[in-house]
Image (cartoon, helix red, strand yellow):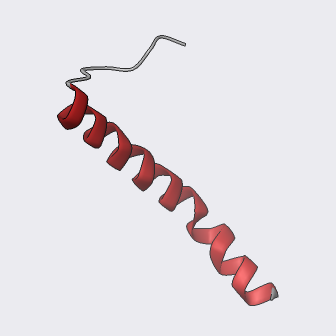
Protein backbone atom coordinates (compact mmCIF):
# COMPACT_ATOMS: atom_id res chain seq x y z
CA UNK A 1 0.00 0.00 0.00
CA UNK A 2 2.81 2.44 0.89
CA UNK A 3 4.69 1.71 -2.33
CA UNK A 4 1.56 2.21 -4.39
CA UNK A 5 0.73 5.52 -2.70
CA UNK A 6 4.32 6.72 -3.12
CA UNK A 7 4.14 5.96 -6.85
CA UNK A 8 0.76 7.67 -7.22
CA UNK A 9 1.91 10.76 -5.34
CA UNK A 10 5.00 11.02 -7.57
CA UNK A 11 3.06 10.91 -10.84
CA UNK A 12 0.00 12.85 -9.64
CA UNK A 13 1.30 16.28 -10.70
CA UNK A 14 2.33 15.01 -14.12
CA UNK A 15 -1.03 13.28 -14.62
CA UNK A 16 -2.99 16.37 -13.57
CA UNK A 17 -0.98 18.56 -15.92
CA UNK A 18 -1.28 16.09 -18.79
CA UNK A 19 -5.06 15.68 -18.37
CA UNK A 20 -5.56 19.43 -18.07
CA UNK A 21 -3.68 19.96 -21.32
CA UNK A 22 -5.65 17.18 -23.01
CA UNK A 23 -8.96 18.68 -21.85
CA UNK A 24 -8.02 22.15 -23.11
CA UNK A 25 -7.07 20.74 -26.50
CA UNK A 26 -10.30 18.74 -26.65
CA UNK A 27 -12.46 21.78 -25.85
CA UNK A 28 -10.54 23.88 -28.34
CA UNK A 29 -11.21 21.47 -31.18
CA UNK A 30 -14.74 20.41 -30.22
CA UNK A 31 -16.23 23.74 -29.17
CA UNK A 32 -13.94 26.32 -30.75
CA UNK A 33 -12.80 27.67 -27.39
CA UNK A 34 -9.77 29.90 -27.82
CA UNK A 35 -8.86 30.64 -24.19
CA UNK A 36 -9.87 30.26 -20.59
CA UNK A 37 -11.86 32.56 -18.35
CA UNK A 38 -9.87 35.20 -16.47
CA UNK A 39 -9.29 34.32 -12.83
In the image, 12: left or right of 30?
Answer: right
Residue farthest along the top direction in this orientation:
38
- Res 1 quadrant in image: bottom right
Q: Is residue 16 depicted above or below 34 in this figure?
A: below
Residue farthest along the front direction in this orientation:
31
Residue 13's x, y, as percent?
57, 57
Q: Is residue 24 depicted above or below 4 in this figure?
A: above
Q: How many marks?
A: 0
Between 20 and 30, the one nearer to me in the picture:
30
Residue at 44%, 14% (x, y): give it: 37
Residue at 39%, 20% (x, y): give it: 36
Residue at 49%, 60% (x, y): give it: 14
In the image, 21: left or right of 5?
Answer: left
Q: Is residue 22 depicted above or below 36 in this figure?
A: below
Residue 26's x, y, as percent?
27, 42
Between 37 and 13, the one nearer to me in the picture:
37
Between 24 and 8, the one nearer to me in the picture:
24
Between 23 and 12, the one nearer to me in the picture:
23
Amino acid sequence: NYVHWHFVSDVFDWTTTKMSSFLKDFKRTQYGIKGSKPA
